[in-house]
Amino acid sequence: MSILLAIPMICVLTLMAIILTVRKKWLAALVFLAAALVLNSATQQIPVRFGKSRNGIDSTGTRIRVFEYNTCAEDRFQHKHDSTFIDYIISQDADILFLPENLYYVDRELDTALSKVYPYGVFHQIPRGKQPEELTLYSKFPLKDIKRLPSQTVEDGSDGMVMATADIGGTAVTLVHLHFTSSHYGIKRGYDLRKEELETIRPALDTVSTPMIICGDLNDLSGSPTLKGLQEYGLRDAWWASGCGPGFTFCKGILRFRLDHLLIPTQVRIKKIKVDHRADFSDHYPIIADLIVPIM
């Protein structure tokens, strides 16, 4: 069943169960609740096992693993960013890391560990209060043509954009790391600010002549004007292409949303993709994807 259809059906079944409970029609309420639970289970992500990354080149292209994780710059999660947190990130054996809200300039322990694995990195500092937030991009592939575009709405929790071109098995691929404004300050305001941010980065995206991979915490839902605007650059949503279940990445609020996205060119193949619900170091879950970049 399509996830787009399943989610509203779950909501309707749950609502009916509540209404019937209020009316003290216990058996009917139990039936609706059971149906909602069964449907919810059916739409959950099937566990995907990820072993070591098989980075290399074959006749189909270059195999790479991408890892995106909003590590959360808020004080309430900083105590979790210890050696276990660092070991978890390294253990994913990714080739490219997208880390929104990484406190690189405050806590160098993570960078010290990652720099031993990732020889290339781009950091974009956004001063904000006592703890500056950063967009960080780590890569095992050489990076060039690095650009940083600060957000025009920094006071509302956005870091803007980092862009760099990676040499992946001889193919030039532009990596775009985004962190757009959330709706914490209001749904309408967040909606308008994200549209503004998209227009701000369009001139830079328009100059890209290589395939693009766009990844990060976009603070928006699939089908939104922001996501549609980014997909106009010949990109598809990797989760809808190969994921299973709703793929929620924001996990600490009352509601659950898929706010983190991986957008890839149509010619890039997806071997596996998952949202790791075991990770408990942030208010987001990470995305892990194994891709094959064709030789072009």
Image (cartoon, rainbow, N blue to C red):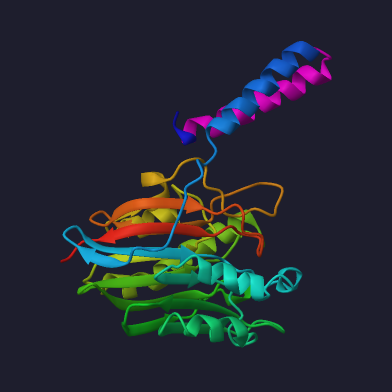
> Could you tell whether 237 is left or right of 74 in the image?
left
49 and 19: which one is in front? 49
> Could you tell whether 163 is left or right of 172 in the image?
right
11 inside magenta stretch: yes
Q: How many marks?
A: 0
Q: Is residue 59 above or below residue 208?
A: above
For residue 173, what is the image quadrant? bottom left
Residue 145 position, x and y percent, is 30, 84
What stretch of residues is rendered in magenta? Answer: 4-25
- For the point 63% across and 31% down, the residue is 11
Image quarter where the N terminus lies is top left
Outermost front residue:
52
216 and 104: which one is in front? 104
209 and 294: which one is in front? 294
Image quarter where the C terminus lies is bottom left
Residue 147 position, x and y percent, is 37, 83
Residue 29 position, x and y percent, is 74, 17
Q: Is residue 163 above or below residue 66?
A: below
- For the point 58% across and 49% down, the residue is 257
For residue 285, what is the image quadrant? bottom right
- For the point 65% across and 53% down, the residue is 251
The overriding secondary structure of the stretch rendered in magenta is helix
